[in-house]
Amino acid sequence: MKKVLVAIILIVVFIFLSVLVVAPIINDNIAKKTANKLADLPLPNNTEFIEMVYIAGKLIGNGNGMQYFGAILIKSELSLEELKEYYLQFAKDEWECVVESQIDTDIKIIEHTKLTFKTNVEGDDYYIVYSWGDNNTIFHGFDIRGH
């Protein structure tokens, strides 16, 4: 009887530890999918794709909660208003396909960790297009980065 109880306890501990290891991997994958959706969108005319970034964790605001962020850096001859109008057609809500000017490598939207583009941003023709992802699985609760 004791051996069965010890075996059950070890199995439960193993499963719990496995979830703690797997959760960040799954959450990073969700953030990557958020960025990939942006990268897969057709670019407007006179615009080039530069790079893509993503991150999962507690990124903005207070309290606990896992957040998923994906972004692309583009260089365009179009104005900010023209780009916002173009990407509006792909947005299902106000948190998707947000377009802002990008003046340096730092991504200012992210508050609780540093996220940067690798590309040296020079000039006023660089823009960030970003979206916030979503996940309804149990894994967001087991990732320490969301707490």
Image (cartoon, rainbow, N blue to C red):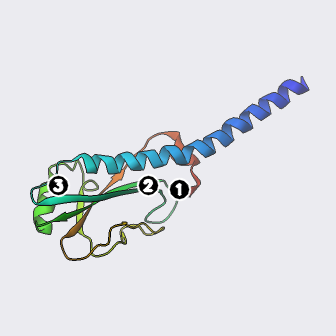
The mark nearer the N terminus, 1 or 2, is 2
Local secondary structure at mark 3: helix
In-image side of 74 versus 9 (left or right): left
- At label 3, which amino acid type do we have? Tyr
Q: Earlier in the sequence, mark 3 or mark 1?
A: 3
> Type of residue at label 1?
Gly
Name the residue carrying label 1.
Answer: 146
What residue is disc 2 on? 67
Q: Residue 55: x and y, percent? A: 43, 56
Q: Residues within 10 Å of mark 1 (few under 14, many from 20)?
A: some
- Residue where numbered disc 3 is placed: 87
- Work out how far the residue at label 1 is from the one at label 2, CA to CA, in angstroms: 7 Å
- Comes first in the chain, label 2 or label 3: 2
Pointer 1 with pointer 2, Cβ within 8 A: yes
Alpha carbon separation for disc pair 2 and 3:
22 Å
Seen in the picture, residue 147 relative to 28 is either above or below; the reply is: below
